[in-house]
């Protein structure tokens, strides 16, 4: 898991915000201010985490980023005892009297969720459906009763009141992705879920051009190639190449002085290296790898 306690995040600052994205962030910010958690869901590479970071930045509160995984448990979220500390005091103020006082106490370290709830952070729970639903049940108490149960803390209080400035932004991939658990309806019912899909060609072109620094017509060629391959997915479009693949191709072509030309062998080789795996995963074929390579070469030739 990763913790961010800074007012400005590099990823959110670098995000390309067109009119549609600005409108989505504006709406989402209003929902957060009204006390409702936001849930961005959609295919990998669609920009969910970047949206969450940009939204968190707008709250002007410290941000904590937490990644879902199947090993996450209450010790990670609430905290755990990390060992023991001892304290010894020797008093010889009166020479003839020797006094020794020694005490041992357990050391406690707050978990990510407890720290965020206690201090009013904006918590981004990235890919939360990769955690077990039983682990995520703790969020029901937070969202419904406004309290965090202090399981295992040995605290005299059974729970902690949620800080009034605390807010949560969830992100997730669709249920058909590997390693993803089905989310309990009780939790989803408390979230405002917004589907984030791939952007259209013009928007993806603008992102690649501005982030990587390639000419717009070159970015357009790359994003068109990736988009066309994504449309060829016959098995599962969720596994198709994403905007990240477009940026990889643009960056490596620029750094290695490879012409962004569909007919150039070096460009075709670069595209095969980057795109073959995601394309092969979404083809309903007996020979997915070889068919994916041929499909990439064909689409390159059509640019």
Image: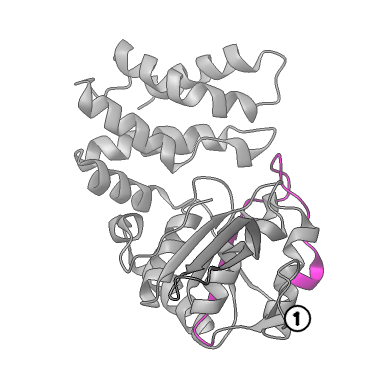
Q: Position of residue 169 (x, y in %)?
A: 55, 68
Q: Secondary structure at mark 1?
A: loop
Taking the image as shown, residue 274 lies to the left or right of residue 170, namely left
Q: Relative to 151, say whether 233 is above or below.
A: above
The residue closer to the viewer here, 135 or 12, is 135
Does 176 lie within the magenta span? yes
Q: Relative to 253, say whether 200 is above or below.
A: below
Report which quarter residue 136 is drawn in: bottom right
Rendered residue at 65%/59% (across/down): 81
The residue closer to the viewer here, 145 or 21, is 145
Q: Position of residue 238 (x, y in %)?
A: 62, 42
Q: Position of residue 257 (x, y in %)?
A: 19, 21
Rendered residue at 73%/69% (across/down): 138
The residue closer to the viewer here, 287 or 146, is 146
Q: Relative to 17, say whether 190 is above or below.
A: below
Does 166 lie within the magenta span? yes
Report which quarter residue 12 is drawn in: bottom left
Q: Relative to 171, say whether 71 is above or below.
A: above
Report which quarter residue 224 is drawn in: top left
Instruction: Report the number of numbered marks.
Output: 1
State which region is magenta: 164-188
Q: Is residue 194 visible?
A: no
Which quadrant of the figure contains the C terminus? top left
Taking the image as shown, residue 141 lies to the left or right of residue 245, namely right
Residue position for label 1: 158
The residue furthest front is: 96
Rendered residue at 51%/15% (across/down): 293
* Disc 1 packing (10 Å; few <14; some 14–19; many ≥20): few
Q: Is residue 24 visible?
A: yes
């Amino acid at each position: 898991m990763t913790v961010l306690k800074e007012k400005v995040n590099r990823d959110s600052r670098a995000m390309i915000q067109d009119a549609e994205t600005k409108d989505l962030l504006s709406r989402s910010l209003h929902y957060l201010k009204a006390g409702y958690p936001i849930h961005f869901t959609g295919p990998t590479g669609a920009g969910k985490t970047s949206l969450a970071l940009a939204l968190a930045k707008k709250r002007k509160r410290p941000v904590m980023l937490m990644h879902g995984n199947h090993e996450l448990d209450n010790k990670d979220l609430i905290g755990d005892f990390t060992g023991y500390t001892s304290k010894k005091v020797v008093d010889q103020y009166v020479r003839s009297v020797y006094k020794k006082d020694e005490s041992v106490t357990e050391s406690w370290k707050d978990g990510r969720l407890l720290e965020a709830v206690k201090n009013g952070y904006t918590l981004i729970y990235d890919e939360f459906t990769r955690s077990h639903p039983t682990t995520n049940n703790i969020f029901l108490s937070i969202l419904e009763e406004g309290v965090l149960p202090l399981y295992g803390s040995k605290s005299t209080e059974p729970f902690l009141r949620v800080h009034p400035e605390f807010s949560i932004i969830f992100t997730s991939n669709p249920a058909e992705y590997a390693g993803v658990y089905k989310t309990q309806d009780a939790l989803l019912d408390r979230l405002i879920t917004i589907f984030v899909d791939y952007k259209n060609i013009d928007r993806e072109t603008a992102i690649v051009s501005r982030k990587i620094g390639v000419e717009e017509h070159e970015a357009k060629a790359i994003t068109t190639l990736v988009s066309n391959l994504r449309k060829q997915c016959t098995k599962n479009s969720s596994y198709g190449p994403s905007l990240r693949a477009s940026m990889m191709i643009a960056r490596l072509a620029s750094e290695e002085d490879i012409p962004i030309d569909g007919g150039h062998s070096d460009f075709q080789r670069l595209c095969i290296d980057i795109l073959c795996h995601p394309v092969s995963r979404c083809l309903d074929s007996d020979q997915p790898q070889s068919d994916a390579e041929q499909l990439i070469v064909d689409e390159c030739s059509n640019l």
